[in-house]
Image (cartoon, rainbow, N blue to C red):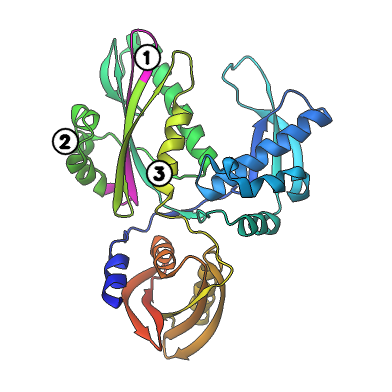
Amino acid sequence: MKRILVLFLACFSLHSLAEEVAGLYSGLVPVANQSAEAREAGVRQALAQVLIKLTGNSEIMLTPSIQSFFTNPNAFVAAIGFRNMPSADETVIQTGLEVSFARQAIDQLIRQAQLPVLPSNRPKLLVWIVRDDALMGRGFIGDYSVSDSSVTEISEDAEAVLQAFDQAMKQRGMPYQLPNFDLQDQLSLSVNEAWSLRADLIGPASERYQTDGWIALRFYTTSTGEVRGAWLYQSAGRGQLNDFRALAGEEFMATAVDSLVDSLARAYTYVPQLNTNELLVQISGVDSFKKYQAVLAQFKKLEVVDSLEISAVKGDQLTLAVDVEGGAELLHSALLRSGRLKDLGTTHTNLRVKLEYSWVSE
């Protein structure tokens, strides 16, 4: 059992660019007007938006156990207001309803309904987007090196695609970055290699960015206006390939991102348990009160941590007894993604798992 656990933990990325995502408990949705009826419907939509962000599942609203909580969604509201929001037609002002929900109430909802949780300390992903255009051929979306004024319209269209992708990722609360598309990228990965979803080439080309994984997404538009595409990702030691399509005039990027994030998030989610598991976590290099405070603050950020106590202090070694909801694997992954702890190994003591780290100062 010990050997299996150690091997499992070793599979997690040692990269440290995961991001603490803000705004997970607030939603912004379009509404027809500022009437009571529109506000009531908007609160329900915003609550659904928040639950999708928190669970990493775009179909979470189909879960039967959640339906009873929507009889009075206003019970979860902390603050509410109207403001303008972007729309597809820049000439039209879209009214948006912004709703902030009470974190404690939402967390209790998730626990009672036994929904999965995607922690706020999320993997940052490098994204390669390739489009095959009937006029311009294949090209990376986000590569602004084109200077020919004759392709201004094409570039604006590419910008719209990028904005749609950015909005979809923000709706899901997933951090990402685009490549630089500099000379090193050009030498490491060609457009055709990315289009072919060559994982053996995309992976090495992505390593320079030190992210927690990468995504390659390709698409083209048929003569009938149908959009067809596919995505491939690798993160947390796993990967998946899938395709997507949309009829002429249909929004395709949000649908593609939803299916992608739904799959990717499964490696990082956990279901809160009524009974937590206690682990010992030993951290060396804690040689000042400032570092001691920083260690405790780091643990208190993590959703998987239910509670913690100081077990022992010896020299620069701090040992914590930590109650976790997601198990040793998810705690280990979250600690490594924080970038503040370096893995020193895993042992067993008195039938409990003991995780050992060294503190990495800022």
Front position among marks 3 and 2: 3
Relative to 55, is 270 above or below?
A: below
Number of numbered labels in the structure image: 3
- Seen in the image, is 258 located left or right of residue 12? right
Magenta stretch: give its range.
208-227
User: 247 or 23: which is nearer to us?
Assistant: 247
Is the residue under label 3 in contact with that under label 1 (CB below 8 Å)?
A: no
Residue 2 screen position, x and y as percent: 30, 77
Distance from disc 2 to disc 1, alpha carbons, whole Å, reads: 25 Å
Residue 187: assigned label: 2
Single out the residue that lies furthest toward the right.
36
Circle 3 residue: 263
Residue 154: assigned label: 1
Point out the tag, 1 or 3, that comes first from the N-terminus: 1
Single out the residue that lies furthest toward the front.
64
User: 103 or 301: which is nearer to us?
Assistant: 103
Point out the tag, 3 or 2, that comes first from the N-terminus: 2
